[in-house]
């Protein structure tokens, strides 16, 4: 029997570098406890959430404070659940936002054609890959959000 190990030149960084071990563990425990999932599943979800936030923050830094230049990113429903859990620990969430974007990043669910078509999710995946952190495509299978039916994008306020 022959075993071939496929190698790539692509070096991928560990998403756990994006948060302190203590805060990472707290987020994982919250996902395990409240969503009744396994620890490995929760760890992967928190990792993907952290990479998503990093990518979104990077994109916001590029366009600056001009809302007309902002680009919409959509998390997958599974990553969005982790986002909801992370907001329960407001200090940690604020720190993740600060490290990722240099400012608080509001959660504003919206469902429009950009999200429904998967375009907003594809932009997010592309931006996540550009961070150099591991992106697990099993977490990014659809273009939906937690937005309830008939929701609209609220106006952006300063």
Image (spheres, rainbow, N blue to C red):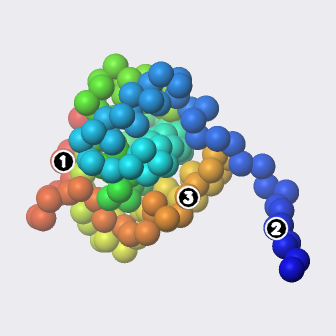
Residue at the far right: name it: 2
User: Residue 151: where, in percent of width, then height?
Assistant: 14, 58
Quadrant in which residue 147 is drawn: bottom left
Seen at 57% across and 35% down, the residue is 16
Frontmost residue, 158 versus 121: 121
Say whether marks 2 and 1 touch (CB < 8 Å): no
What is the CA distance from the residue labelled 2 to the residue labelled 3?
17 Å
Residue at the far front: name it: 1
User: Residue 39: where, in percent of width, then height?
Assistant: 42, 44
> In what element is the residue under mark 3?
loop
Against 113, residue 17 (above or below) is: above
> In what element is the residue under mark 2?
loop
Residue at the far left: name it: 150
Quarter of the image where the C terminus is located:
top left
Q: Is residue 26 left or right of residue 9?
A: left
In front of the other: label 2 or label 3? Answer: 2
Q: Which residue is mark 2?
A: 6
Can residue 10 be seen in this snapshot? yes
Q: Which residue is mark 1?
A: 154
Frontmost residue, 89 versus 31: 31
Against 87, residue 139 (above or below) is: below
Q: Which residue is mark 3?
A: 136
């Amino acid at each position: 029997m022959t075993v071939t190990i496929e190698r790539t030149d692509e070096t991928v960084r560990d998403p756990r570098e994006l948060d302190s071990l203590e805060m990472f563990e707290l987020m994982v425990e919250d996902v395990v406890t409240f969503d009744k999932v396994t620890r490995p599943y929760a760890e992967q979800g928190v990792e993907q959430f952290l990479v998503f936030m990093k990518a979104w923050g990077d994109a916001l830094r590029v366009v600056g404070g001009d809302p007309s230049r902002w680009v919409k990113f959509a998390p997958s429903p599974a990553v969005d659940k982790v986002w909801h859990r992370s907001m329960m620990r407001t200090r940690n969430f604020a720190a993740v936002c600060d490290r990722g974007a240099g400012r608080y990043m509001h959660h504003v669910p919206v469902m429009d054609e950009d999200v429904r078509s998967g375009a907003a999710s594809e932009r997010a995946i592309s931006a996540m890959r550009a961070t150099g952190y591991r992106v697990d495509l099993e977490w990014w299978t659809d273009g939906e959000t937690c937005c309830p039916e008939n929701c609209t994008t609220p106006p952006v306020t300063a």
